[in-house]
Image (cartoon, rainbow, N blue to C red):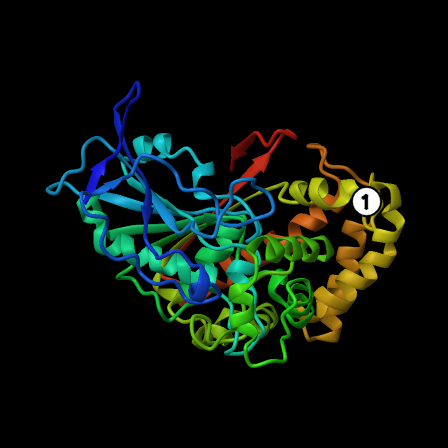
Amino acid sequence: MISSYLAIYTIERLIISVVGIPYAKPPIGELRFKKPEAYGRFPKGGLRAVRFSPPCTQSYSYNSTEDCLYLNIVTPDQPSQTSLRPVIIYIHGGSLLSCTAADYDLDVLASKANAVVVTLNYRLGAFGFLTTGDSSLPGNYGLWDQHLAIKWVHENIESFGGDKNRVTLAGQSAGGWSVGFQMMSPHNNRKLFQRVIMMSGSPFSFTFINREVSNIVESIADKVNCNPGKWNFLQCLQKANAEDIMTANLRSVRQEVPFFPIQDGDFLPHDMGYIVSDFFRNGIETVKDQLGNFAEYDLFVSFTSQEGLMFEKGILDPLSKDMTGFGLDYNEGLMDEVYNMAILEHLLPTYTGNPYGRRLVSNATRAFYTMKHRTNVGTTQKERWLSDFVDMAGMLSQLTNSNRSSIQRRAFQKNFYCVTRSFGCHIQ
């Protein structure tokens, strides 16, 4: 029972905000690096749902904590049991390393869409995705958190005026990756959600090809004095100081973006690297048996024309004094060195196994990405390459294959073309 909540009067209508609802027990102690457990009954006397929970443990927030598995619900007007509204569950981005559900102002979305909007926290970084690649530390805890929150919504949303049979799962960036993985998991189906909005992120991404986990585990284990080779490795990690794990987490991030969903034989039964590679080479029909319930959902995909800007600021700017070593001409396009490494050796074998087709793609991409050219919106070719490499190639190929085959129920695309550095966009 909810004993108190926030009522906000806007110019247009009343908005009811119920925030800080626990959907899982705190993942601490023996529950650290484990699947989440349902929270159960609220405290006697009801729950005061008037304050957002702190972010899940991360290096980018001073008040983050492991006790973070909470969700928030915003609904226009008083909930009605006789006139149920559609539901939007929004999963935040942040490279699976940062951000929180409280970052988003949901009042406008709930009002304009006349929908019940739900946001949720899930475990991030090492706490959400650390894995040894086997059953001792299988990973994907953040995905399990999301799944449990989705189930909570299915079981309880009618009490907040939401229709459990009209649920849209939406996410941006890492949230887009997340909703894609939720679509693939055999643990989800159309009873839990029916539609998906995937924004600036797709599981069909090069991000998930050929990823190694052992060096990350060893780095963190060394920091907290735990031995991955011993039988009590998990228990050692569960007793370790969270601050030490977070510090080691940050050290790993400086090397690369290390945490990602992985085949665990349970939530994700199949290897994502092989799925993505086979998908690009041969089309979505060849991997449909490995995609779980992916085909059951209506799908809407969107992206911006300058996805690479966030990588320019976060990755390229700190390295601007030594761009030659990084392989990028900061003011123009890709250098031959990075072209040969990233495109010839990594991307093209994934795109096509045909040597003749590989030469055609090689010539076209070399002409496009390495030329000294700037577009009329100020996008350099390195920004275009970063955009295409991280998200857009996978998202467009996913849509193209879905629409050509009978695998997807309905698939749609919308492009948001950014025209300023402040990310002002218009829709095309």
The answer to whether any part of residue 181 appears in the image is no
- In the foreground, 396 or 21: 21
Q: Residue at x 47, y 59 (%)?
A: 142
Residue at the spot of label 1: 319
x and y percent of residue 137 in the render? 52, 73
In the rendering, at what x and y percent does residue 180 appear? Answer: 46, 59
The structure residue drawn at horizontal position 57% and vertical position 51%, both measured from the top left corner, is 97
Per the image, label 1 sits on a secondary structure element best described as helix
Decide: is 222 above or below 14: below
Quadrant in which the N terminus appears: top left
Q: Position of residue 294 (x, y in %)?
A: 41, 65
Q: Nearer the viewer, residue 149 or 364?
A: 149
**Residue 229 in the figure: left or right of residue 414:** right
Callout count: 1
The residue shown at (64%, 74%) is 227
Q: Amino acid at mark 1?
A: Leu
